[in-house]
Structure formats: structure tokens, C-alpha cells
Amino acid sequence: MVSFPVRGSTQAPAKINLHLAIGEKRNDGFHSLLSIFQMVDLFDRIELTIKPQPVLSVEIEMDGMQAVENNTMELAATLFLERVGITGEVTITCKKQIPEKAGLGGGSSDAAAVLLLLNRLYEYPLKAEQLLKLGSEIGSDVPFFLGDTPCACVEGRGEYLTPLAHRGELVGFIVMPEGPGISTAKAFAALDAHRGANGVQKSTLGKEKLIAMYAEEPGKWRFTNDFRAVVGSLAPLYDLLDNLMGEFPGCFGTLSGSGAAYIIIGEKKDEIEVIRTKLEKMAVNVTICDIKSLHRGHSGDTV
Ligand code: C5P
């Protein structure tokens, strides 16, 4: 039996894409993809309260400011409560740490965190597969964040997940360029325009190869990101970062998602520190944020 007011908090982790191959545009307008998603220890903090009311209303505050309409958390709470048949006045506050328009999955992770928290607070009215279906209505990356696997090979539009076996810890940092970030929808449109009549080039990196590569040391990774071809005015910055990574053959650097975050990752903290110091001396206009890979339960729930 649930007693009002319902209250809980949780944290929503970021993801990085170690590899991202974009396939054809499907009939539903989404593109099929083949990607390696890795959760990392950068979190948004979410608090949720529900008071009894005869109608459903959802209010979202992000860092003390009212959120834009159709925020992914608003959508998640509204869809969940409608499906389960609950009314009330819902207040969600979110302290953002994950940069937006970065390719780090912040909006999708926030939505998944709200769904998981609500399902727990209401004693699991929705089964895992119902949550997954609901999640994919909100965003392509939401199913990954609903799962309990911190690293997966992701296919389809984002709904088919193959969990990857635990490997040694990855350490590194996110390089976030100053500026407005990159809209996912615009990046997909730019990629379609760039490919034009030539369509999709078939990659030699199939799923099995990707999974085997993930287990190797980052210096041996040959992962790629198709969005790298359409980064526009950020190309000089990423070229500089790629060149920098060329000096550190034990580590790996890549654009995450459709950008704008660039990830530098390896297995040795001291090597990462050297890269970081070198980058800081280059006086490029970026924000740097340390990360490490998540392996197990990352929940910060206090229900
Ligand atoms: O699902 P999500 O909100 O991340 O998608 C944002 C936009 O990115 C979609 O509206 C679509 O234009 C594009 N997209 C796509 N193929 C995907 C994921 C996203 O074309 N697999």
C-alpha cells in the first residue's frame, strides 16, 4: 500500500559511445545503429514528490529553474502515471551535471531514472518489458538506461541490447566544447545530407568484432563514429584532439553520440593525467570533466 506524499530520489548516469555506426534511415524516420554504450560515473540528481490530487499535473525544475515543456522527465512521469492510472501533483527537481546536447544521453537517462523510481515507489505496477516499451516512446537511448547492464552493444534504433562482459576499469575525461552543443535530430539530418545518393558505406566492424575489441586495451581499439564527418565548425577542435591522441597510443579518443562531447579514455590514470595537463596548456575553449566506467549497480536511490 502506497501512502502519500510519495517521495524518492535517484541519480541518472551519463553514457559515452565508444563506437557509433549509423545505418539506413528506416520507414519510421529513425536510423538503425550499431554502437557500444558505456555508462560512466557522471550523474544528474533527481528528486520526486507526488501529493494526492484528482487530476494529474507534472512540474519540473532544473537547477531551480522551470524546465522547458516536453522535457523527457515530464513525459516519463506523465506516461507512467497515465498508464498505471494514478493522478496527483508531481514535482520533480533535477540537479544537472551531465551537459546537454553533448551526446552523453542526459535527457534519456533522466527519463529512465524517473520511470525506474516511479515503478519502485508504486511497488512495480509495470513489468520490465512494459517499461522498455514506454521508455522507447520517450527516446531512443532510454531502453539502455532502463537496463542494468553498464556496457552494451546497442542495435535497432536503440532497443536491442547485448550486455558486454565486465572488463578492467576505464578512466578518462570528457572534453565539452564551449557553445550551444549539437542537436541530435540536426546531426542525423546533416549525416543524411552528407551521404546523399551514395548511401551508407558498409563497415567491416561487425557486432562480434566490436564485442571482442571492447575486451582489448583501449590503445588497440579501432572504433569509429559516423557523426565525425558532419561536425561542422567543431571539426578543427576534434582534429586537434585526434592529433593529441595520436601521441598516446595506449589511450583512445572519440566523439560521443552525435557530439558535442569528445571522450578521452584509457586504463592508466597517470597516462590520462599527462593528456589532461597537455590539453589544459593548449588553452582551447572547453570544459573538462573526469569520468570512469561504471561496472555494477550505480543506484543512488533513497526511497
Ligand atoms: O529518440 P531521440 O529523442 O534521441 O531522437 C531525436 C531525433 O534524432 C529523432 O527525432 C530522429 O530525428 C533522430 N534519430 C534517428 N535515429 C535514431 C535516433 C534518433 O534518426 N536511432
Image: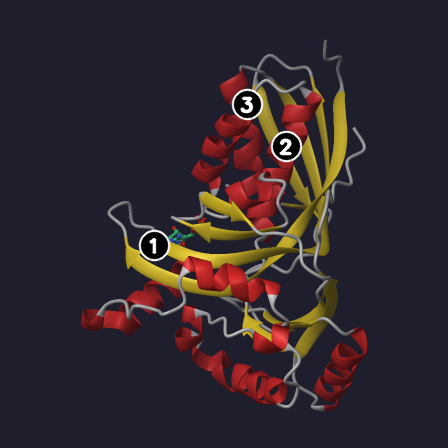
Answer yes or no: is residue 71 visible: no
Residue 223 placed where, x, y %? Answer: 50, 71
Q: Earlier in the sequence, mark 1 or mark 3?
A: 1
Residue at the location (57% across, 89% down)?
243
Residue 87 placed where, x, y %? Answer: 59, 16
- Amino acid at the residue labelled 1: His
As drawn, the label of residue 116 is 2
Whether pointer 1 and pointer 3 mark residues with C-beta atoms closer than 8 Å, the reply is: no
Mark 1 or mark 3, which is nearer to you? 3
Residue 94 left/right relative to 263: right
Whether pointer 2 and pointer 1 mark residues with C-beta atoms closer than 8 Å, the reply is: no
- Name the residue that disc number 3 marks: 127
Residue 34, quarter of the rendered image? bottom left
Q: Earlier in the sequence, mark 3 or mark 2?
A: 2
- The quarter of the image holding the N terminus is top right
Up-down relation of residue 237 to residue 62 (above or below): below
- Name the residue that disc number 1 marks: 31
Residue 141 left/right relative to 266: left
Residue 68 placed where, x, y %? Answer: 56, 46
Q: Nearer the viewer, residue 272 or 90?
A: 272
Whether disc 2's CB lies below 8 Å from ligand 1 is answered no
Residue 198 placed where, x, y %? Answer: 21, 72
Neighbour tally class for label 1: few under 14, some 14-19, many 20 plus, Cα within 10 Å = some
Answer yes or no: is residue 279 visible: yes
Q: Farthest residue toward the left?
A: 197
- Amino acid at the residue labelled 2: Leu
Cα–Cα span, label 2 and label 1 = 26 Å
Mark 3 or mark 2, which is nearer to you? 3
The structure's colour scheme is: secondary structure
Q: Farthest residue toward the top?
A: 1
Whether disc 1's CB lies below 8 Å from ligand 1 is answered yes
